[in-house]
Amino acid sequence: MNLRLLRQCSVFLAAAVVLLPAQGIDLSAFRDGAHHWYDITDEVPKLIIPVPDQPRYQPDEVASIADNILLYQRSNGGWPKNYDMTAVLTDSQRTILLRTRDDFSLTTFDNGATHAQIEYLAAAVQRHPEQRYHDAVIRGIEFILSAQYPNGGFPQFFPDTSGYRKYITYNDGAMLGVVRILQRIAGGTPQYAFVPPELRSRATAAYRRALQCILRTQIRVDGSLTAWCQQYDHRTLAPQNARTFEPIAICSMESAEIVQFLMRLPEPDSAVITAVEGAVRWFRRSGITGIRVETVKAEKEKFMYHTSEDDRRVVPDASAPVIWTRMYEIPTNRPMFCRRDGRVVYSLAEVERERRTGYKWYGYEPAEVIDAYPAWRKRWTSSASRPEH
């Protein structure tokens, strides 16, 4: 090798070490899937199940985790949900994953699937510029683009869109996880610099369609903008039911995530500003005071999908911070809940223990939006368009 070229390569490699230190990549996006794999019996069958004391890779073992992620990727470019990407797999587990690569019935965007894996691999490329990681990211992006509806929405599962799998889904970050990937590609985020121009162009167009879908699905009640439902019809964009205990409703937790996303847009247009303002007004008038939810010890009980050693109840507390129920009835805006059998009720006490302890019915997520809103409003809105206090 030419001595001058060798010196240039040495300088490049030294710079790469400085710019991309050997450290772990954030694994938090995989936490929910791992929890489901180890602790929850899912309605969707698992390809592999954990063995007792399943070992796990450490966060700084990036190449090993990335290679694991490749094993889970299906040949259509997507990933199944609810597995531990850091598990040190047995030979048997690896064999099953390889043998089922052409099973597309489980590829999904739910519970972080697909978008979390793409994010990790894109970051891994910067530390370990292996072609296999690069190619897996490209296949994942192509999978995302193939799943998008003409109206900009994304199904929960693809290509199996049976039942509620076909609905546009904000629950569990399914839609927003995908949109964030497209946004980063479109915005030229460095970790996606290797994405070819033609694919970047298509991802940019897909991102714009998705943003318009988000704005179009905001619910109006009596002509006023409120917030969002968990799922929407893939053709009409009308709110839809999903699982039996997830009826049509305005949902505070999912809406807070959507509004946070909109508030982080670098240059929101008037439609985005109007959407945020409407949602903030709704959050402010839908908060509940004077109560808190407490978790209490209870006799251990094994249900079909989880085991509970506690229970939850609502108790009076004049000093408690404002809290929101997850679901609000349309058009009354009455806090609502739902039993596993699909029966709508209006108090947590009326929900059977299996669903009381197996689903999040109350939360504080809108408070983060309300707290961040004044600074955002000052930057982007005129005094004439500000929501009332």
Image (cartoon, helix red, strand yellow):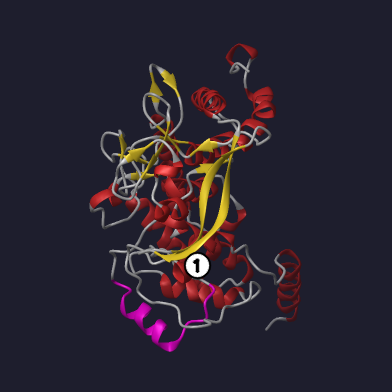
The residue positioned 36% from the left and 40% from the top of the image is 152
Res. 83 in view? no
Vertical position of residue 321 compared to residue 85: above or below = above
Residue linked to disc 1 = 34
The residue positioned 35% from the left and 71% from the top of the image is 46
Res. 385 in view? yes
Q: Position of residue 277 (x, y in %)?
A: 55, 23
The residue positioned 70% from the left and 66% from the top of the image is 20
Q: Position of residue 3 (x, y in %)?
A: 74, 81
Q: Amino acid at mark 1?
A: Ala
Vertical position of residue 22 compared to residue 335: above or below = below
Vertical position of residue 89 compared to residue 240: above or below = below
Of residues 304 and 265, which is closer to you in this image?
Answer: 304
Of residues 130 and 99, which is closer to you in this image?
Answer: 99
Q: Give the quadrant of the N terminus.
A: bottom right
Is residue 126 toward the left or the right of residue 95 in the image?
right
Q: Position of residue 22 (x, y in %)?
A: 70, 72
Of all residues, the one furthest to the front in this rendering is: 299
Q: What's the magenta region?
A: 86-102
Residue 87 part of the magenta-drawn span: yes
Residue 98 part of the magenta-drawn span: yes
Vertical position of residue 315 compared to residue 280: above or below = below
Q: Give the quadrant of the C terminus.
A: top right
Is residue 164 toward the left or the right of residue 176 in the image?
left
Q: Position of residue 251 (x, y in %)?
A: 44, 37
The residue positioned 30% from the left and 33% from the top of the image is 238
Assess disc 1: are there few (<14), some (14-19) or many (≥20) residues with their C-alpha within 10 Å of its C-alpha.
some
Q: Quadrant of residue 246?
A: top left
Is residue 350 toward the left or the right of residue 20 in the image?
left
Is disc 1 placed on a helix, strand or loop?
helix
